[in-house]
Amino acid sequence: MIFAAFPLADALGCVLAHSHRLPDRMLRKGLVLDEAAIAALRAAGRNEVIAARLEPGDVAENEAAVRLAAALGAPGLSPGRAGTGRVNLHAETAGLLRVDAARVDAVNLLHEALTVATLPDFSVVAARDMVATIKVIPFAVPGAVLSHVEAASQERGGGLSLHPFLPLKVGLALSELSGLKESVIEGTIAATRQRVTALGGSLLAPLTCPHEPDAIAAALRRMLGAGAELLLVAGASATVDRRDVGPEGVVRAGGEILHFGMPVDPGNLICIGRIGAVTALVLPGCARSPKPNGIDLVLHRVFAGLPVGPAEIMRMGVGGLLKDTDRPLPRAKAAAAPQPERKRPAVAAVVLAAGKSSRMAPYNKLLVTDRSGKPMVARVVDNILSSRARPIIVVTGHRDADIRAALANRPVTFVHAEDYASGLSASLKTGIAALPETAAAALVCLGDMPLVTGRMLDRVIDAWDPDEGRSIVVPTHQGRAGNPILWSRTYFADILGLDGDAGARALLRRHEEQVAEAEIGDDAVLRDFDTVDSLATLPSHLRPAEIG
């Protein structure tokens, strides 16, 4: 790749290195210069342009990122759309992410043009979580470099794998001693159920029994008979040896003990065993607490279908310090340090439902009902409720009371635009001003677009990433821009400065470099219904009976 200042006469086919704002258009960084772009630059008085020219064998940044993502990926990991040399990998389902650090390092060490960043090994991920990002730094990569990565991945694997959590049925046996408080047993059951259900499993009816090996063994056999696929024993007293009461109960039930102890704190005193093919865990005392501890590390692996034997347990020491151990005894009074939760930035929705609907006279477009009796605005809001957008702000104006009645009992917040008659911007500004500080972005939704589904809205939300320069997202269909548009909080002040009936689209040109497109395979994002004639084009089940 040649990076230089090229005379315009030599710039055809080069990749533009910096964006250029011209009187009649914006030429964005990364654009492959064609005759029209060069003519526009020349007309603007430019004589040369800083750009990159690909050489034979070079692979353009987006194609390179797509190929690298394919080489590193695995079943259960989906690549996002390539843009500016970046492709993100997302989990398709909840599970445990495995990362081969040596393979990832090998890619990052191969060439400065290739970068791969991942979550830590053994990360618990939810569906749609981003697990890795691939970024190609320059505008192109030598093809030989990519071919080397692809060949190595075919031979040794890509380096990433996702192990979906299994819906295991879990049995819990709790042994009792005289004086053990009922609240302790209840707390253990609650903490265990929380752990199990969070991983997609189900907890069978817990069994209590005396703190004796034979009683514990009988409880384990009963749970196996009930279909338990994982067995847990919570002893009334801490296990101090592999021949203690709890482990001995596993042995008398026909099982064996594989390992005692773990280099994780809290959680040192766990005992790992099995009865036939079913894993049996004698829990440490810290398992009574819902706070993160060593039992979580083991359960993650068991639910992911990964082996948990002596070798796996003894390798948990790095990262196994889960809390400050410089504490007074007894251990039972020491508090485990909670792990911070990863939260997605909140994307709110603003529904514009204040207009007079003059083009659909004598009907009000927002209140016209489909064949089931549902008003159009209710159909729109129900679609938004099925998306991830929260909170939902509904802006009212004309026929305020009727709009509120149409949306009765729905979890939305109403705000009234006093000056709604002055134009669309008045309603928009009212909605934006009502958003809470927690809203990092907002989808501006029109009340007359009932065909835009929650899944389409989520696709727009998924395309939003301010860190990657995608702080405004416009849904498109076959290259045509539609609605709703997603705006980052950065632009709320600009929106509050609008006036007239133009809405916020006037801002798109001003911030063109930050606009991303979310392609939707349906023309719903292009279709609003604001005339009587347009109602006749609705699907039959959404069409008002009087329209036919």
Image (cartoon, rainbow, N blue to C red):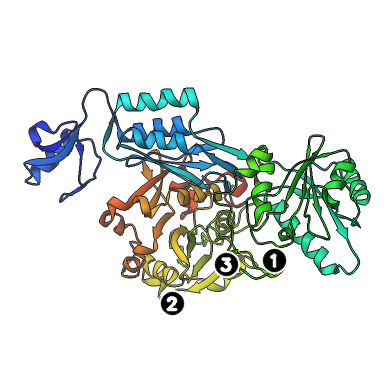
- 150 lies above or below 123: above
Location of the N terminus (image quadrant):
top left
Residues at marks 1 and 2, CA–CA distance in whole angstroms: 62 Å
- The residue sitting at the bottom extreme is 418
**Pointers 1 and 2 in contact (C-beta within 8 Å):** no
Q: Which residue is mark 3?
A: 412
Q: Is residue 28 left or right of residue 264?
A: left
Task: Place residue 378 in its image quadrant.
Answer: bottom right
Q: Is residue 116 left or right of residue 325?
A: left
- 147 lies above or below 226: above
Q: Is residue 527 visible?
A: no
Name the spot of residue 242 as percent of width and height, x first: 79, 47
Residues at marks 3 and 2, CA–CA distance in whole angstroms: 19 Å
Name the spot of residue 399 as percent of width and height, x first: 52, 71
Residues at marks 1 and 3, CA–CA distance in whole angstroms: 47 Å
Q: Is residue 242 visible?
A: yes
Label number found at residue 331: 1
Residue type at mark 2 is Glu
Residue type at mark 1 is Arg
